[in-house]
Amino acid sequence: MITNRKKRSAVLIAVVLALVTGAPLARAARLAAITVTTGRDYVFAQQMVFTLTASSDANITRAAVYYQSDRGGLQQREAAFESAPTINAMETIELRGGAIPPFSKVTFWWEIADAAGQTLTTPRETFDYYDNRYDWQIVSDQGITVRWVAGDAAFGEALLDTAIESLPAIADEIGVTPPARIDIYAYPGREDLIGALRLGGREWAAGQARPELGVVLVDVPFTADAPVLTRRLIPHELTHLLIYQATQPNYDSVPAWLDEGLAVANEGSPDPVFATTLDKATRADALFAFAQLCAPFPSDAGQALLAYAQSGSLMQFVRDRYGADAIRRLLRVYREQASCEPGVERALGVTLPALENDWRNRSAAGTQAVGAVVETSAPWLALWLILSLALLPIVIGLPSLVRRGQK
């Protein structure tokens, strides 16, 4: 058993040693660990703010925030403050022009040091950087999350159901496993979506996939047209996500006619404007050469519309002519960084001009067939119209006659 006298002797020896050697035993015993409180906030596409309150027994001498998006490089900012035992620091990041990609995940942490040589690295915190100008409603299932602004719960469920139902077939044709997480944002109007894209540093589009983030942005107002737009836009944008999955890290090698064309071909409610545009251009001999559509489509709205219409028609032709595996073969060669025209020959065994010629012949035949049907049927259509007009009063009166007969 240690006696009190021995304890006092041990303490006395420690004090003498401290005095002789200059060891800061008493000061080290009094120092407390650095304590911190962190925070973050942002205004979409304007500013992101990281805040810190730090305390220690010694003056805080350094505070630096580190941050990065899930698709961006690591950034560091040294906070400016007056050294003191307790400090409040704030770092503001300008977001205009897409400095941090919108709809990405952002991770941040702080490093702090004091005058006594103590340091602290805070735990990493992650949050979603999305368009917080709106009060989003949310629904999720099977790894897909849908956010929408205007509309009831049934509207959001319809968006989610369309994504869940269309995703497996698209993934099967492309030959990939879908991302574990997909986020879909349905904006209430076109101007809202355009504003979000421009604020985030992107140009206008009817919808947009951010395939590297697993994010889809669509313009689906809560109107009577919503079901049609939903079946059209969501499969279109999901196709871009899965093409990215199939071709990364060389997604940029995929020709626009393939990327956009397959997306158009997968639309559940085809846009009739595409068929009209394609028919008119075919008759006027004003079609693009597909070599012109290897790169991004024209910025002119009318020319872009034709480019989409042609590309969608071509990809449907490829499916029909070359079989179920044709899409996978094309994507495979572009994942291997084939150039636009050689990639077609490697995948399909035919040159791009020859493929285009076959497609044009079929398209021209289809256009002529439609015209011939209309021309040869014109007299019968006229007769049908005359009879319809003659019978119209009877047809209008039938419901009341039936009702009267039931009384």
Image (cartoon, grey):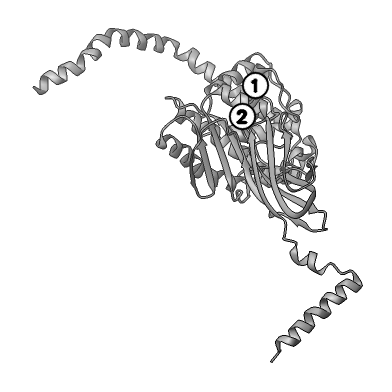
Mark in the foreground, 2 or 1 = 1
Type of the residue with mark 2: Ser
Dot 2: what SS? helix
**Taking 23 as reference, is 247 above or below it?**
above
Residue in the image at 58% along x and 44% along y: 182
Instruction: Determine which quarter of the picture holds residue 321.
Output: top right
Type of the residue with mark 1: Leu
Return the residue at label 1: 306
From the viewer's side, name the closer residue of 246 and 328: 246
Task: Please state the horizontal and vertical placement of residue 162, each as a whole percent of the image.
Answer: 48, 39
Residue in the image at 69% along x and 17% along y: 300
Instruction: Determine which quarter of the picture holds residue 45.
Output: top right
Q: Quadrant of the C terminus?
A: top left
From the viewer's side, name the closer residue of 88 and 153: 88
Task: Please state the horizontal and vertical placement of residue 187, each as a whole percent of the image.
Answer: 54, 29
Task: Please state the horizontal and vertical placement of residue 137, each as a whole percent of the image.
Answer: 48, 37
Q: Earlier in the sequence, mark 2 or mark 1?
A: 1
From the viewer's side, name the closer residue of 151 and 276: 151
Residue at far left of view = 407
Residues at marks 2 and 1, CA–CA distance in whole angstroms:
11 Å
Residue at far right of view = 20
Q: Quadrant of the N terminus?
A: bottom right
Residue in the image at 72% along x and 46% along y: 332
Dot 1: what SS? helix
Give neighbour class at mark 2: few <14, some 14-19, many 20+ (Cα, 10 Å).
Answer: many
Q: Which mark is residue 313?
A: 2
Q: Which mark is residue 257?
A: none
Give neighbour class at mark 1: few <14, some 14-19, many 20+ (Cα, 10 Å).
Answer: many
Task: Please state the horizontal and vertical placement of residue 229, each as a whole percent of the image.
Answer: 50, 29
Asked if residue 320 can be seen in this view, the reply is no
